[in-house]
């Protein structure tokens, strides 16, 4: 049963918060099931942060159900250039988000259900949560062969991954979140999560590829709505609470004081890209010169998302060494992103002698370098 949430029924929520009196307050005796009315990945991730930071979960666990418009979500310690096709994502308008939990990269759309299980640190139990999901699936379709693995994935028919897991454990609270593939666009999923970038050297957490399958392919009655209701019912039965799915607006500051600042932080370049563990790129590309191709070597060190060392090597007869050095020094300290690279090249063109051939070569290099960003 869906119940819209407002300040009038805040009384249903958890008490003893670590925030001022506004927002969720007084008195729920057991647990709570929430569902976001937003499909914005940053807003929904902010709800996770807010609950983790502000709710007292002692004896009052929370299940949060949410879905997002098309987006790619990387783990806290991952490298987006190694995990996904950033150029294609920009072309298609697909959002990139970095969550605060570990784990691998996932593709979200409205056919993918996200489940977040909030508990105290002592009650944190990923396997128990996954068993709950399996029971819910079997309650809807007893013939489904779904098993939890030691890696805390869910496999369909022993081979197809339908759910992946990540978690965050704080000082007193913890959450475990997982996906559930219902009717996700498989073509987009595979193309967005396939990095085209070569020569990346990084110690960042790497995702583990897997065969995936939608539950809707197995049984056309297994819609997202059916599955969310089934999971909510199983959760309510397990925790002996009312089977009510409470609809929440993640932008409502009266319910979640300070939540919009959390969502805003999650959208910043400094968080999404700047938190990437230090990495380097050692690659090359060819440029046309007359009737032949010349090799351009590129070595770049990136720290906190910014270029720390840049060494672009081109044949002297194509681009003089002093010009190459000027280009290399210009990149130092700049963001490793195509927008900033375009700005740098434009500045170089304005501050250098008017030489159409030289400017043309800079433009060629600019486009090639943006291609690895």
Image (cartoon, rainbow, N blue to C red):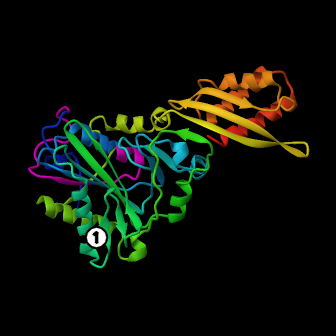
Classify 10 Å Cα crowding around label 1: few (below 14), some (14-19), many (20 and above).
many
* Residue 304: % across, % down: 50, 30
* Residue 20: % across, % down: 19, 31
The residue indicated by pointer 1 is 137
Q: Is residue 328 left or right of residue 101?
A: right
The residue closer to the viewer here, 326 or 261, is 326
On screen, residue 251 above or below 242: above
Does the magenta stretch mainly form a helix, a strand or a loop? Answer: loop
* Residue 42: % across, % down: 40, 44
Query: Which residue occupies 27% across, 74% down?
Result: 140
Q: Is residue 332 left or right of residue 76?
A: right
Query: Which residue occupies 42% across, 40% down?
Result: 77
The residue closer to the viewer here, 225 or 80, is 80
Q: Is residue 282 visible?
A: yes
Q: Which quarter of the figure is the N terminus placed in?
A: bottom left
Residue furthest left in the image? 29
* Picture quadrant of residue 362: top right
SS type, badge 1 = helix
Q: Give the residues in magenta.
A: 19-45
Query: Which residue occupies 11% across, 43% down?
Result: 26
Query: Which residue occupies 82% across, 32% down?
Result: 315
* Picture quadrant of residue 242: bottom left
On screen, residue 205 above or below 242: above
On screen, residue 28 above or below 138: above
On screen, residue 347 above or below 225: above
Q: Is residue 60 left or right of residue 199?
A: left
Q: State yes or no: residue 288 in magenta.
A: no
* Residue 5: % across, % down: 23, 51
Q: Is residue 254 visible?
A: no
* Picture quadrant of residue 348: top right
């Amino acid at each position: 049963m869906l119940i819209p949430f407002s300040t009038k029924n805040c009384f249903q929520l958890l008490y003893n918060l670590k925030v001022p009196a506004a927002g969720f307050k007084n008195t729920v005796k057991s647990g709570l099931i929430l569902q976001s009315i937003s499909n914005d990945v940053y807003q929904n991730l902010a709800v996770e942060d807010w609950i983790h930071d502000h709710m007292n979960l002692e004896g009052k666990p929370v299940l949060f159900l949410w879905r997002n418009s098309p987006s790619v979500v990387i783990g806290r310690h991952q490298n987006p250039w190694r995990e996904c096709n950033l150029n294609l994502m920009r072309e298609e308008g697909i959002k990139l988000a970095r969550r605060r939990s570990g784990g691998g990269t996932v593709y979200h759309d409205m056919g993918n259900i996200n489940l977040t299980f909030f508990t105290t640190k002592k009650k944190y139990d990923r396997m128990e949560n996954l068993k709950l999901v399996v029971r819910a699936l079997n309650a809807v379709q007893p013939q489904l062969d779904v098993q939890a693995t030691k890696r805390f994935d869910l496999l369909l028919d022993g081979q197809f991954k339908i759910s992946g897991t990540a978690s965050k454990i704080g000082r007193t609270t913890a959450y475990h979140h997982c996906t559930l593939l219902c009717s996700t666009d498989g073509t987009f999923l595979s193309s967005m999560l396939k990095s085209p970038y070569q020569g990346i050297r990084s110690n960042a957490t790497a995702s583990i590829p897997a065969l995936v399958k939608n539950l809707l392919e197995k049984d056309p009655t297994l819609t997202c709505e059916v599955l969310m209701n089934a999971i909510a019912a199983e959760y309510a039965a397990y925790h002996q609470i009312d089977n009510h799915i409470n609809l929440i607006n993640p932008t409502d500051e009266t319910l979640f004081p300070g939540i919009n600042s959390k969502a805003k932080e999650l959208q910043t370049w400094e968080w999404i890209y700047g938190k990437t563990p230090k990495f380097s790129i050692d690659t090359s590309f060819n440029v046309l010169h007359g009737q032949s191709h010349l090799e351009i070597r590129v070595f770049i060190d990136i720290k906190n998302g910014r270029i720390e060392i840049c060494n672009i090597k081109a044949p002297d007869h194509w681009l003089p060494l002093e010009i190459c050095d000027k280009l290399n020094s210009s990149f130092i300290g700049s963001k490793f992103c195509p927008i900033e690279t375009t700005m740098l090249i434009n500045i170089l063109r304005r501050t250098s002698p008017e030489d159409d051939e030289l400017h043309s070569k800079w433009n060629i290099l600019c486009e090639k370098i943006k291609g690895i960003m």
